[in-house]
Amino acid sequence: MDAQSTQSALLHRDGGVSPSRGALELTLTWGGRVLGALVLAWVLVLARGTSAGPAIEDPGRFLVTLLDGVTFAGLLFVVASGFTLIFGLMRTVNMAHGSLFLLSAFIAIRVQQAMVGKTRNIESADVGILDWIVPLLVGASIAAVVGIVMQQLFLRWNQGQELRQALITLAISVVLADQMLREFGGLAVRMVWPREVTHFIEIFGSRYATSRLFMLAVAIVVGIALWVWLTRTRMGMVIRAGVDDEQMVRALGINITLVFAITFFVGAFLAGMGGVMGASFAGAATGADGDWLLNSLVVVIIGGLGSIKGAVAGSLLYGLVIAFSPAYLPSSYTFYSIILTFVLLAVVLAVRPNGLFGRAG
């Protein structure tokens, strides 16, 4: 073996990048930049024959579409941040995350109906801010309790056994789905935004609902709180250390089992919180649990396992693609918009196999 081959083998063994791999990554990176420039040119100037039209001709429609993507990204982040805590940081496979989302939504709707005193035809004028916050806290707390019971009874004994955890949580999600169908029925229901946040603002002649901006504000608060907790508190440092070397943390006398239980509780609470926000945004119905589990998986994989910053980036990219695809694809091709979300996933993984801000596990 010559010197160059030996060096290449050593680089591969030590986690380095081989010349061919480096060239591929460079090509994909530049290809991504060129593709991004073409997309930007299309949206700004060339998008005639689309439902939105070129942004320079209709800036109001462009800004509304942009806000749609960013605000939906806020909802995606709240749900996916809980998933990235459980799956990304703890390496615990929780395929029942979507079930916790839907369970919280249904419970919050029932609580709101009880507080308002109506079960049908509830309008925003009937709902005060407490009639939204209290159901959110109740629904998310019950989802968190169900989550921690699931973790303590079934998952903590199978730590590191991803396939077994996936099968267990899939079985739990099926049981929860059947029970929710029996208890809440199969018809779509909705959580109602409070009257304090249901107004409209005007953007270049287009009306925009302030409830979506409120949803984004909640997501920003959640993101800041998570960042502070994970990077500026002792428990956050213990969580990150426990993921990297659980045995060493235990040897230091830290109850890592309790710390992981609290982390799972927070992750399940965020799933429930996202469920209430999602039910306010688009309603809740049987089958939404699977959709939101998929959304969380896509966001976490794009952003990188265990990274809150990655969850933010993944949510933004995913939300913008969902918003811009139907608006700026040619009118006869809008049915391809759903495919572009998975094209985004494939492109990101081709360039960054561990996600945008992930690292090798």
Image: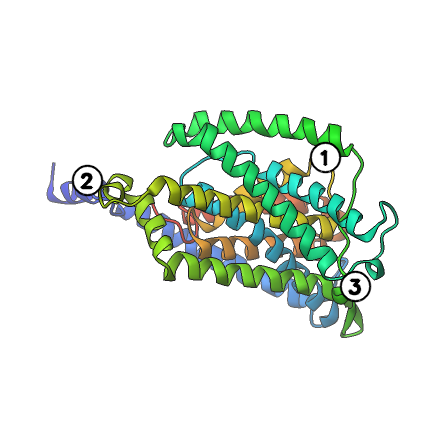
Q: Which mark is residue 9?
A: 2
Cα separation, mark 3 vs mark 1, equals 27 Å
Which amino acid type is shown beneath numbered disc 1?
Answer: Thr
Q: Indicate the colouring scheme.
A: rainbow
Cα separation, mark 3 vs mark 2, equals 64 Å
User: Does residue 332 appear in the picture of this structure?
Assistant: yes
Q: Residues within 10 Å of mark 1 (few under 14, many from 20)?
A: some
Closer to us: mark 3 or mark 2? 3
Residue 116 percent across, percent down from the top left = 81, 53
Residue where numbered disc 3 is placed: 195
Residue where numbered disc 1 is placed: 286
Residue located 79% across and 63% down the image: 195
Looking at the image, is 147 positioned above or below residue 72? above
| Res 328 quadrant in image | bottom right
- The quarter of the picture where the N terminus appears is top left
Looking at the picture, tell me which residue is in the foreground, 349 or 95. Answer: 95
**Left-right relation of 204 to 319:** right
Residue 40 percent across, percent down from the top left = 59, 64
Q: Secondary structure at mark 2?
A: helix
